[in-house]
Amino acid sequence: MYAAVMFLGGTNTSAVQSIVAVERTVFYREKAAGMYSALPYAFAQVAIETIYIAIQTLIYSFILYAMIGFHWTVGKFFLFYFFVFMCFVYFTMYGMMLVALTPNYHIAAIVMSFFLSFWNLFSGFLIPRTQIPIWWRWYYWASPVAWTIYGLVTSQIGDKNNLIEIPGGGEVSIKLYLKDSFGFEYDFLGVVAVVHVAWAVFFCFVFAYAIKFLNFQRR
């Protein structure tokens, strides 16, 4: 799941940047001619990308869910789809936002790579939150990918009380193991879902208002 959301999400971020950069040039011309208003243009672009992501996520989720072998229930699959969908949305909005904030997509790509490396490092996969030094733990909560992994893992197995054997530690329930080892709690899923929406909305509005107020045209 980590690889699925991190790498495809990163691909979405990278792929959208050149498109937004080209369309921004057209937007400058049409805005100067009085044809486009900035915010409707920006939100229309967001809507188009969101529709594409919804279809992409549906196909991807069916394949990934079956390959992992999760239990097929409507509720669990919906949660899986929701977290993957919101993950791809905020990754895409992040890429669009960086293009809007920088003069060209080459600089946007450099900034993107810089922050994605931190999202990756503090996602909770390479180093679980409980093992991150306390003075760096705040960045775990500032990594959108950490929230996605939290949501995906906890929504699928965070409510299970099946016993598993821990080498050198005896038997413990899956629910308790996730809480002690990773800090994942099933009752926290509602907050995790809201934070996903908040990340996407934040990146979306920064993109929209950057398009409105920043102009990198040199003529």
Image (cartoon, rainbow, N blue to C red):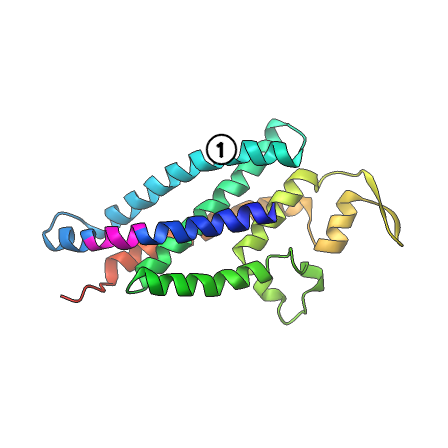
Residue at 59%, 62% in the rendered image = 121
**Residue 124 locus on image (x, y percent):** 64, 57
Amino acid residing under circle 1:
Leu
Q: Which residue is mark 1?
A: 58
Q: Position of residue 58 (x, y in %)?
A: 49, 33
Q: Residue at x 70, y 42 (%)?
A: 158
Q: Residue furthest bottom?
A: 135
Quadrant position of residue 133: bottom right
Q: Residue furthest left?
A: 33
Please report the bounds of the magenta region as a residue range.
19-25
Q: Is residue 9 left or right of residue 205?
A: right
Q: Nearer the viewer, residue 32 or 39?
A: 32
Residue 79 rendering spot, x and y as whole percentages: 57, 37
39 sits to left or right of 196: left
Relative to residue 149, is residue 206 depicted above or below? below
Residue 41, visible in the rendered structure: yes
Rendered view: 114 above or below 28? below
Q: Is residue 93 visible?
A: no
Q: Quadrant of the C terminus?
A: bottom left
